[in-house]
């Protein structure tokens, strides 16, 4: 039985070559692989230069962003076209100054030239201490100051570390029959600074 099965497979393979089926199949496979590669490259370029969704985790931005299970939509295009488009109150993603392999999300509190109170809460520095944000830097802070590591710990942050502006957040809920319900909330409604933060002096 094994020998006969092998014989039939070899015979069908030989017939396929005689009929020209294998070159056709090879072309089809090659085109399919090429389309997959092109699609993957397009997705990569879009995510790197236009925007992409990112999963958030951690308590530093509560209550604006949930501790877990929340996705934000990054806007990378605006920042690339106009690096000076960042304004006070914007939510941004950036490489952590303490660990460049990590991407963090914080709120912009001060821009270049602003005089900032280092820590209005008085937990990490006297509430009377102020600092001038140098050119090419911003001052960032987490909405949940008690659980945030931000400019109060490592000072002004280079704008070169900023990856994107946060455009929106996506929360996934569950409705009847377990169908997912996606709700998109614009951040334009919460561009205000945290209640503990003092207005910078320009």
Image: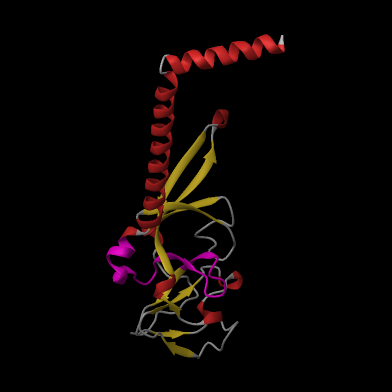
Residue 181, above or below 160: above
Left or right of 68? Residue 162 is left
Q: Where is residue 201 in the image (x, y as percent from the top left)?
A: 36, 85
Residue sitting at x 34%, y 85%? 113
Front-most of residues 5 and 84: 5
* Residue 91 falls within the magenta-colored stretch: yes
Question: Could you tell me residue 197's position as x and y percent?
Answer: 47, 76
In the depicted structure, whether residue 145 falls above or below residue 25: below
Q: Where is residue 76 in the image (x, y as percent from the top left)?
A: 36, 59
Is 176 on the left or on the right of 36, as rendered? right
- Please tell me which residue is depicted at 50% across the width and 47% down the height of the picture: 171
Residue 31: which quarter of the image?
Answer: top left
Q: What stretch is highlighted in magenta?
A: 78-106
Q: Which quarter of the picture shows residue 79?
A: bottom left
- Depicted 36 relative to depicted 43: above or below: above
Quadrant of the frame with the N terminus: top right
Residue 196 visible within the image:
yes
In the picture, residue 193 is in which quadrant? bottom left
């Amino acid at each position: 039985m094994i020998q006969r099965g092998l014989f039939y497979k070899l015979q069908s393979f030989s017939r396929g070559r005689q009929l020209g089926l294998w070159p056709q199949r090879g072309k089809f496979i090659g085109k399919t692989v090429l389309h997959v590669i092109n699609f993957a490259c397009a997705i990569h370029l879009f995510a790197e230069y236009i925007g992409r969704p990112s999963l958030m985790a951690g308590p530093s931005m509560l209550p604006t962003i949930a501790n877990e299970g929340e996705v934000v939509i990054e806007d990378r295009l605006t920042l690339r076209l106009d690096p000076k488009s960042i304004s006070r109150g914007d939510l941004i993603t950036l490489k952590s100054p303490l660990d460049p392999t990590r991407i963090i999300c914080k709120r912009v509190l001060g821009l270049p030239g602003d005089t900032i109170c280092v820590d209005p809460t008085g937990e990490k520095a006297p509430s009377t201490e102020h600092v001038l944000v140098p050119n090419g830097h911003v001052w960032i802070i987490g909405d949940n100051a008690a659980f945030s590591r931000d400019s109060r710990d490592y000072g002004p942050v280079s704008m070169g570390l900023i990856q994107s502006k946060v455009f929106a957040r996506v929360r996934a809920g569950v409705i009847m029959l377990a169908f997912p319900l996606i709700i998109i909330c614009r951040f334009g409604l919460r561009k205000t600074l945290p209640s503990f933060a003092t207005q910078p002096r320009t």
